[in-house]
Image (cartoon, rainbow, N blue to C red):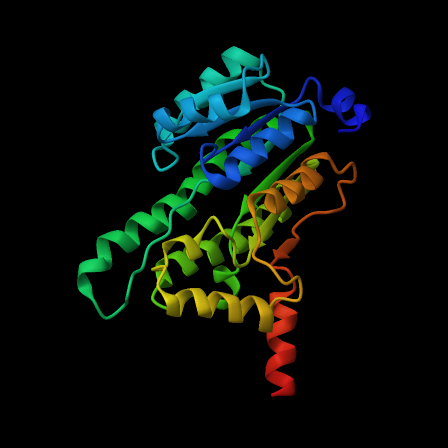
Amino acid sequence: MNSNYQMINQDRIAVVTGAAGGFGQQIVLQLLAAGFYVAATDLFEDKLERLQNYVGSSEKLGLFGMDICDLQSVQKAGEQIINLFGDKIFVLVNNAGIFGRTPVLLTEYHEKARQIIDTNLIGTYNCTSFFSKFMVKRKSGRVINISSMAGTWGASFASAYSASKAGMIAASKSWARELGAYGVCVNAIAPGIFQTNMLERAEEDERSVSMKKKIVLDYIPAGRFGNSEDVAEVVLFLATCKTDYLNGAIFELDGGLNIGTLESIHLS
């Protein structure tokens, strides 16, 4: 890691939600390496302990239990973060989220749909509402929302998840307008097909494995699935980018899947 990054970020705080998950762990590692104080938050505190073991001990790492769906929990965790590190919050990574199938024709999935939307969209709203105030106060900051390609394409039998991720994209653009005048940049990352998300939830039978390989070979120019390091690299770029003119952008992190699919359809 460039020592200039570490000097610039040495007094800055980055808050990461869903820090104990696959994306979250790598994001925490990258931000720590860049010199940030990192407030790693997660609903499951036992998983935060495993994060501690994974990352190692660091005086710049703080672990905080936080339910992003509960505004009071967000406020409480926020106060704990400020008590430990101060209020120089420069980065918020809204990474926490859940996935679930919600077939629209089956009424038993209504409660699950509500849970997904509350977590992915309302949870992101709660965190941005609380932590962005400290960025506005200093007229500088970065809000980075981890959305999904499902938010632009729509995933079959996962309408609640797709809608919640589409909402994150729209919210990112709205907040970019709202907060940009205060030097706060809001951008979103829309991961495509990754090892750590929806593919892990598919049944690993011969047919699904064959399907995965076909997707990679036929439609993803990069020739592979994404991984958590890919997401963390883009988060690091957005967190450390000096310009405040990069605002309201949606980064499709899909290995060229969007281009590859369209080209395949055109040529077939």
Q: Is residue 30 found left or right of 242 in the rendered image? A: left
Q: How many marks?
A: 0
Q: Position of residue 33 (x, y in %)?
A: 67, 26
Residue at 79 percent of width and 40 percent of height: 243
| In the foreground, 73 or 98 | 98
Q: Position of residue 35 (x, y in %)?
A: 69, 22
Q: Position of residue 76 (x, y in %)?
A: 40, 21
| In the foreground, 50 or 192 | 50
In the figure, 138 relative to 235: above or below?
above
Quadrant in the picture for residue 221: bottom right
Q: Is residue 68 found left or right of 132 in the rendered image? A: left
Q: Is residue 262 found left or right of 82 in the rendered image? A: right
Residue at 50 percent of width and 67 percent of height: 153
Q: Position of residue 173 (x, y in %)?
A: 59, 52
In the figure, 151 relative to 119: above or below?
below
The residue most toward the left is 108
Q: Quadrant of the N terminus?
A: top right
Residue at 59 percent of width and 49 percent of height: 188
Quadrant in the picture for residue 155: bottom left
Quadrant in the picture for residue 231: top right
The answer to whether residue 126 is seen in the rendering is: yes
Residue at 48 percent of width and 65 percent of height: 212
In the figure, 243 relative to 31: above or below?
below
